[in-house]
Amino acid sequence: MLTRQISFSAPIFVIVFLVQEAGLNQFKLPGGGFSLFVIFALVWAIMSTPEIAALSGFAAGILMDLSQSSDGPFGQWTLIMVIVCYGVSYLGYGDSNINGNPIGVVFFVVIANLASEVIFIASGVLLGVSTGSFGQTLLVLLGNSVWTLVVTPIVLPIFSYLHGLIFEKRAK
């Protein structure tokens, strides 16, 4: 059963990644913009069990490491996405205040996205990746959070429908 669910999930991850890379990365939005793929991975993780979320975070991290717009060393995004996806799933699993409430999911995604960006910056400093000035970094973090807050409610119904289509059991 799990193999079938992963087989159906993998093309969805690749399609969202390609939409991000081929389409959304071409637009330069003020404040740093947003990452539809990170929003997708976090929504997927919130709605999944911790084991599925960790696997989804691993797949999302590998794809993000393969991205041409990724600045860090290979594996950095993989580690961060596994930690963040597992963490949000672990904290939200079985809590109907988060999973059953779209506003809770939106704010959980915004906070998890901000946490992943902060972890990326902190680990990048430890790995010797150059960062911008403090003010510029703060502006990008704030802008990314605002854009994520705006975009997540728009795409949440689509992503939750796709997750439900694959992972929910139906009576025949």
Image (tube, helix red, strand yellow):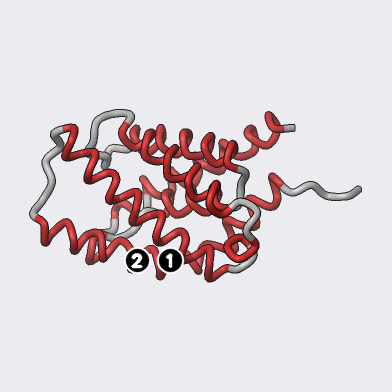
The x and y percentages for residue 164 are: 69, 52
Q: Nearer the viewer, residue 122 or 160?
A: 122
Which of the image's four quarters has the N terminus? top right
Residue at image coords 8%, 54%: 133
Q: CA distance from mark 2 to mark 1?
A: 6 Å
Q: On the rendered structure, is 137 left or right of 166? A: left
The x and y percentages for residue 52 are: 59, 38
Q: Residue 62 occupies which quadrant of the picture? A: top left
Give residue 151's mark: 1
Q: Nearer the viewer, residue 11 or 129?
A: 129
The x and y percentages for residue 81 are: 41, 41
- CB within 8 Å, label 2 to label 1: yes
Mark 1 Cα-neighbour bin, 10 Å: few <14, some 14–19, many ≥20: some
Q: What secondary structure is found at the residue carrying circle 1?
A: helix
Give residue 147's mark: 2
Q: On the rendered structure, is 90 left or right of 126? A: right
Residue at image coords 38%, 63%: 148
Question: Residue type at mark 2?
Answer: Trp
